[in-house]
Structure formats: C-alpha cells, structure tokens
Image (cartoon, rainbow, N blue to C red):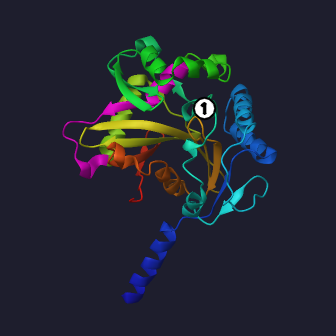
Amino acid sequence: MRLLLALAAMMLGVQLQAGPVRIALLTDSYALQDTLDLLKENGCHAESVAAFRRVVERYNSTPGPDFGKFPRARGGFHGFESPTQLVAALPHKLYETRHAYEFNCFDTLQLLTDGQFRTSKRAGEIQGTILSLRTLPQGTQVVPTTTVASAFTNAYPDWYRQATRDAVPRRLAEFRPILTTGLFRCLELPANTDERQLDKIVLKTLQDGWKQMGLVFPTKVQVVLCNQVNVPKRILVSVHAGVLFSRQRGFTYLEKAGGSGPFVRLDLQAKEDLVPWLSAIFAGAERQGFTNHFVTFNDSSIMRLELEER
C-alpha cells in the first residue's frame, strides 16, 4: 500500500510540475516572422497579419524593458526551465514599462482573431445597462451607460482612438466597439454569490455578459481573458486579454502587455503553465480591494489565478 501511495504521489508531482517555457519579445526578425506564419496558419486575415507586423515594429523601434536577467536568446527566444523562473527574471510588471502608450491588449486580440471572432448583433441592437470602464490617467473608473458607443468612448478616449485609427483595418471598425465593450468591462455578481462556487458564478456572469453583446468566440484559437473580483462589492472586472494557439507540441500564447508594455510570445507545454505568468500581473491587486482572480479560455473554461502574498 505504501508503495502504491508513493507512486501515486510521484505521478501527481509530475503532473503538477510546470514544463519549460520560452519567451520572445518579437524584436528578432525570425521570431516575428514565425509568429506571423502562425497567425496565417490559424486563419487570421492577411490584412490583420500585416497590421500586427506594423504595430510590433513600431513599438520595437524605440527602447523597451531591460531584460538583463534573461538567458542568451537563440533565434529570438529566451528559454527558461519553468514559468515561475521566467516571472522571477522579469525586471518589473511589463505593463509598467516606461514607453509611449500605443496599442493595447484588446486591440491586439482583435487583430490576432480577425476572421474568427463574430457577433450576432449590431451595436444599436444591444440593450441593457453596460458598466463600462472609463480610462483615466490614474486608472479606470466604472461608468454606467446604455449604449455601446458610449461604453467604447469611455474605454478608449479620443487621443487613443486617434492614435490607433490607422492601425486597425477599416473593415474591423464596426466590430471594434462591440468587441471592446464585450470584453473590457465590469459586471455585477449575483446578490447571493457563494465564494465556494465563485469560479462557476464568475464564468456564468461572464457568459451572460457575452450573450448580451452577441459575441461568438473563435473555434481555432482560445481567447484568454483575465478577470478581477471584489466579493464584498460583488463586482467582476475583465482587464486583460491574450490569445492561445494550439501547436503540434504544446501551445503558443500572444499578448500585448498593456498600452506601454511589449508584445510577448510564450511557447508552453500546457495551458496551465500560463497561470504563474498571468498571476504575476495582479500582484498587489488586493490593495485595490480585489479578493479573487481568474483566467477564462474562450467562453467555456475557467482557472483560478493564485497571487503570492506580499
């Protein structure tokens, strides 16, 4: 019996142990081209692939973060034994990088999923209260509104819309407000929210919000959405997005680290290996009243993000 228990523990340890990961900041021409080829293979429209190249090259034309603790790159990729080791080597939270605020994570997601994300509604057909997030220099503010247009202008102030107008293909202009409002928003949790069932409640609340917007998620790729929860106030805020691609061996994850941070590519063995990377984004969020954090994959899967105590 002891031998069986020991073997079971060993097997469990192997399952829980994160595999190696490699990261590319897409500053290397090989890594960038390989990433563009990945987008094409997964059905991304050629116009958006070209637009993605332009925004990456524009960002990389000026200095980004100092990755002096990273091992030497090979073909544009830095290798690490685990996601935890990678996070420990970061100079700071990447979205806090001192760099011009240019293209954000939600607009990047729209380029990466072009041809796959759809909506069953037009903006004028969407009804009900929308708790939009107003972007301010000191952070975000929740603002109730009843129209997608108002929610979009709250989320994307005039200066940002002007700065990114030519970066997003024109044929995506009509869908952009709906996608932004549907993903980058605040939702109310039910009055009877039970923390023991919080993951299920969060996913159901998100699903109801996406249904309100008529959003139809991709099938070839997975949309990764990071969500913060304040249980006492019963609010759920979706604040970060990326895209996960299935590969022959493992997965590739792409994101833009906020408006000021770099474009990031991670090659992983399992999608669970994303948890340490995404958890690190929210370190210290408890000081803002957030009690729980989750990541969703498309509209059907949810995982808890575990933040280190500080």
- In this rendering, does residue 222 appear at all? no
> Magenta span has 191?
yes
- Looking at this rendering, what residue extends furthest in the bottom direction? 2
Please name the residue shown 51% across and 23% down the image. Answer: 156
Circle 1 Cα neighbour tier, 10 Å, few/some/many (<14 / 14–19 / ≥20): some
The residue lying toward the viewer, choosing from 143 and 300, is: 143
> Quadrant of residue 154 in the image?
top left
Please name the residue shown 47% across and 78% down the image. Answer: 10
Q: Secondary structure at mark 1?
A: loop
Q: Position of residue 63 (x, y in %)?
A: 72, 42
35 is higher (above) or lower (below) than 112 = below
Please name the residue shown 55% across and 42% down the image. Answer: 95
Q: From the image, which quarter does the N terminus lie in?
A: bottom left
Span shown in magenta: 175-198
> Magenta span has 263?
no
244 is higher (above) or lower (below) than 135 = below
**Residue indicated by mark 1:** 101
> Quadrant of residue 219 in the image?
top right
Which amino acid, by three-letter code, is at mark 1?
Tyr
- Tally the numbered discs: 1
The residue lying toward the viewer, choosing from 217 and 254, is: 254
Please name the residue shown 25% across and 49% down the image. Answer: 195
User: Relative to 7, is 64 on the left or the right?
Assistant: right
- In this rendering, does residue 216 appear at all? yes
Q: Position of residue 291 (x, y in %)?
A: 32, 48
